[in-house]
Each structure stands twice: as structure tokens, then as C-alpha cells.
Amino acid sequence: MDKKKLTFHIRGILEALGDDPEREGLKETPVRAAAMFEEMFEGMNYTNEEIAGMFSKTFTDDCLSDSQNAITVSGIEFFSYCEHHIALMYNMTAEVTYIPNGKVLGLSKIARICDMAGKRLQLQERITSDIAQIVSIAADTPDVAVTVKASHSCMTARGIKKTSAQTVTTVKLGKMKGNQ
């Protein structure tokens, strides 16, 4: 990410809005906002494979051999921004289920995968698919299901202004495809 360009363009946005970037309350805003963008969009710096590598800490146990029992982590809160309006997707939660292939991911790794996948400009459909793919790689299992629920500020705070609207997306891989 180019922090210098971000700072320059944020200053330009303030000017385009008709405000003075040199006034007391805005003097450091372009620098602060550029740092915020770096943090909010950190996931854009990594491929799905790289994220899987970052969060692939697994544990093995004899009870996992030939197991068909699924592991589900639900209520994972995170956020993202839509690529069409750079609008916040909020009240976002993920439910991630997978069938271990002889090993399990550390539970916090699943939440970290959701966080990092969300830190990109994208569609909710892609976030859901990315989380499933990353978990599949990190846990070394083809059997993953992910459901993401979110409100989109491009629908709730502007445009049609349907404040209760929520979008639900689901991706199922491997054996999970048969579980409707």
C-alpha cells in the first residue's frame, strides 16, 4: 500500500468536499486516515494462500483419525467494505464448520482468518468463499462450510435505506456440499 498516495488523495477528498485541510481539526486527518486505510485493508496485501500460512497452527490427536465429526465456530464478529461504494459491511458474523482431516486448527485462527479475509475491498459473496478456501488450506481439509451474515451501509445508511436488511451468503466445499 502506498501511504503517501493515500495521504495525498484523502487531502484532495477533503478539499473536494469543500473543507480546508489546513484547519485545526483536519491538519493531521490525511495522515491518520491513511494509517486507518492501511489497517482496514491489510488483507489486500496477502493472497488466500499466504493468509492460510499465517494462521495454519494445527493440533493432532488420536481421536481425530477417521473422524467425520464436524467442528463449528459461530458468532465470529468482523467487518469489511464493499468494493462498489467503499461502504462498511457491519453486524457481520461468520459461522465456520469443517471436518478435520486428522488435525484441528487453533480456534482463534478461524477468527483471525475471518478478520483478515474481511480486510479487503470486495463482495460479501467473495468474503464467504475466501474464508472457506483459506480454512480448507489452513486445516488441510476439503470439507468446509461458511455462512456470513451482514448489514451493508450502502443499503442501510444511503440509497434505499432499508435499515433492517441483512445479507446471508453460504459456501460449502467437499462433503459439506451434501449437507443442505
Image (cartoon, grey):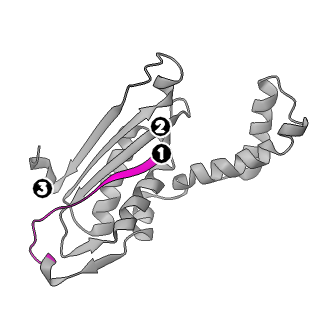
Per the rendering, the mark at residue 175 is: 3
Query: Earlier along the polypeptide chain: callout 1 or callout 2?
Result: 1
The quadrant of the rendering that contains the C terminus is top left
Left or right: residue 31 compared with residue 43:
right
Image-quadrant location for residue 165: top left
Left or right: residue 91 compared with residue 128:
right
Q: Tell me where residue 131 appears, x and y as whole percent.
A: 35, 53
Location of mark 1 (residue): 79
> Is residue 145 among the parts visible in the rendering?
yes
Q: Amino acid at mark 3?
A: Lys
Question: Which residues fall within the magenta stretch?
Answer: 64-78
Q: Secondary structure at mark 1?
A: strand
Q: Secondary structure at mark 2?
A: strand
Q: Tell me where residue 23 appears, x and y as whole percent.
A: 90, 35
The CA distance from mark 1 to mark 2 is 6 Å
Image-quadrant location for residue 140: bottom left
> Is residue 82 among the parts visible in the rendering?
no
Query: Earlier along the polypeptide chain: callout 3 or callout 1?
Result: 1
Location of mark 2 (residue): 89
Q: Amino acid at mark 1?
A: Phe
